[in-house]
Image (spheres, rainbow, N blue to C red):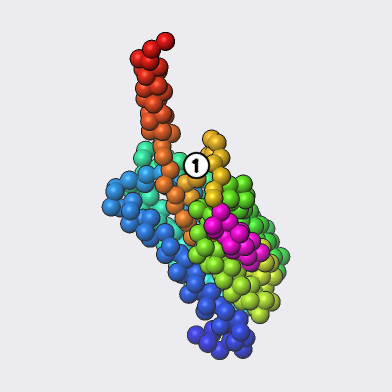
């Protein structure tokens, strides 16, 4: 293989480490899908994290195939990631409700088929050489930066509620470690499109660990009418994702529980002597 003859041993070393860590992160949702398979229901879980992860993997795979230099490590991890995320999506479709299945198919067609096809055809047929590689690379960077909005929303919630329940330490550690390794890979490979997004990933990971250290023993604040979270998504700039699912009480069930309580209060009030 050409990669074994690479003179850039540091890039090779970090690329191999990045593949190992990213593969482990890709397998992180397995407990979620084991639960889905066992209960034959997707419950409150969403398909969006897996669709985004697949879209990101497809883009980075396309970018890797355009590079003139050997990009075997970039190709292997994103090819594996694309297969794994596709399996997750198929499993989700098998056990999802009609509405959830319909929404998932729509999102898949718009994002994973339509958007990717648009990017591919525009860059492949209207651009050539270095320009095509540069444009596709910065499209990948833009998607990676946009995806970081998910963990940033969790950071905001942790600060507001002083509760680290929805931000497990292992997620922050993996995000930081993954960012360091892939930044080093991009740095030694002299690929700015790989290195730049991981600077943000590293900063975000450090911020999450700092917040965990500050609030891990704090008494959580009760936030009235807080919108329930269903997933926490961490997607690194090479397409790997880790999803931390949170059980959410269905609104109808919640209203069903709260309704009788109000009725009971009225009954009790009527029974009390004036």
Which residue is rendered at x = 61% and y = 76% of the image? 185
**Disc 1: CA contacts within 10 A as few (<14), some (14-19) or many (>=20):** few
Residue placed most toward the observer, 271 or 9: 271
Q: On the rendered structure, is 8 left or right of 167?
A: right
Q: Which residue is mark 1?
A: 228
The vertical placement of 27 against 157, above or below, is: below
Q: Furthest residue to the right?
A: 131
Q: On the rendered structure, is 140 left or right of 83?
A: right
Q: Give the image quarter of residue 265.
A: top left
Is 214 covered by the magenta stretch? yes
Secondary structure of the residue carrying numbered label 1: loop
Which residue is rendered at x = 52% and y = 79% of the image? 16
Which residue is rendered at x = 63% and y = 76% of the image? 184
Q: On the rendered structure, is 133 left or right of 117?
A: right
Q: Furthest residue to the top?
A: 274
The vertical placement of 25 against 95, above or below, is: below
Range drawn in magenta: 201-218
Residue 153 visible here: no
């Amino acid at each position: 293989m050409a990669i074994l003859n690479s003179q850039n041993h540091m890039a090779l070393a970090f690329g191999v480490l990045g593949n190992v860590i990213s593969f482990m992160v890709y397998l992180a949702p397995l407990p979620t899908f084991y639960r889905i398979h066992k209960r034959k229901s997707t419950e409150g879980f969403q398909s969006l994290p897996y669709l985004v992860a697949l879209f990101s993997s497809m883009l980075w795979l396309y970018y890797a195939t355009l590079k003139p230099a050997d990009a075997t490590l970039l190709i292997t991890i994103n090819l594996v990631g694309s297969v794994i995320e596709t399996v997750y999506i198929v499993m989700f479709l098998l056990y999802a409700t009609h509405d959830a299945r319909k929404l998932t198919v729509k999102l898949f067609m718009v994002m994973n088929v339509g958007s990717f096809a648009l990017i591919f055809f525009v860059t492949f047929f209207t651009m050539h050489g270095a320009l095509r590689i540069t444009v596709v690379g910065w499209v990948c960077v833009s998607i990676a930066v946009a995806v970081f909005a998910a963990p940033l929303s969790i950071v905001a919630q942790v600060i507001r509620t002083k509760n680290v329940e929805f931000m497990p330490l292992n997620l922050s550690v993996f995000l930081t470690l993954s960012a360091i390794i892939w930044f080093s890979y991009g740095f030694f490979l002299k690929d700015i499109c790989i290195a730049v997004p991981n600077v943000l990933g590293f900063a975000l990971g450090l911020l999450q660990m700092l917040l965990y250290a500050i609030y891990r023993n704090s008494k959580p604040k009760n936030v009235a009418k807080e919108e329930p979270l269903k997933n926490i998504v961490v997607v690194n700039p090479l397409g790997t994702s880790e999803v931390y699912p949170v059980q959410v009480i269905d609104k109808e069930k919640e209203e069903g529980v709260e309704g009788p309580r109000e009725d009971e209060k009225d009954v009790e009030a009527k029974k009390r002597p004036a």
